[in-house]
């Protein structure tokens, strides 16, 4: 597991997702992402589910 930083908190991703995020240059040298939507589009279903509360918070979901 790896952690990247989003605007509202830490976001845990598996190693394959982390490598994809690094390859696509979606984070800077400090592992901070400026475009959370791009991150959400590049993570697997397991990473998405693991971070569901943070994703819902950032997308404005009330559920």
Image: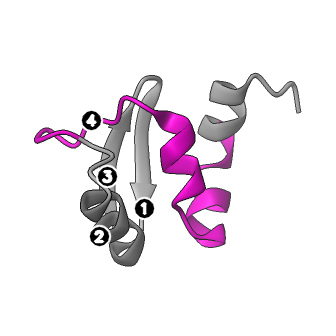
The magenta span reads 28-53
Q: CA distance from mark 4 to mark 3?
A: 10 Å
Q: CA distance from mark 1 to mark 2?
A: 10 Å
Residue pictured at 41% horizontal, 69% vertical: 17
Residues at discs 2 and 4 in contact (Cβ within 8 Å): no
Q: CA distance from mark 2 to mark 4?
A: 14 Å
Of the 4 image quadrants, the one containing the C terminus is top right
Q: Which residue is mark 1?
A: 13
Please name whichever residue, 55 or 21, is drawn nearer the observer in this view of the structure: 21
Residue pictured at 63% horizontal, 27% vertical: 58
Residue neighbourhood size for the residue with mark 2, other residues' Cα within 10 Å, grouped as few (<14), some (14–19), many (≥20) = few
**For numbered disc 2, what is the local secondary structure?**
helix
Question: Mark 3 or mark 2, which is nearer the start of the sequence?
Answer: 3
Pinpoint residue 23: horizontal percent, then vertical percent.
26, 64
Q: Which residue is mark 2?
A: 19
Residues at discs 4 and 3 in contact (Cβ within 8 Å): no
Picture disc at residue 3: 3
Q: Is residue 35 above or below residue 47?
A: above
**For numbered disc 3, what is the local secondary structure?**
strand
């Amino acid at each position: 597991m790896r952690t990247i930083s989003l605007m509202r908190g830490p976001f845990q991703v598996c190693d394959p997702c982390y490598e994809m995020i690094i390859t696509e240059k979606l984070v800077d040298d400090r592992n901070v992402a400026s475009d959370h939507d791009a991150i959400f589009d590049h993570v697997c279903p397991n990473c998405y589910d693991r971070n569901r509360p943070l994703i819902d918070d950032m997308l404005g979901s009330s559920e």
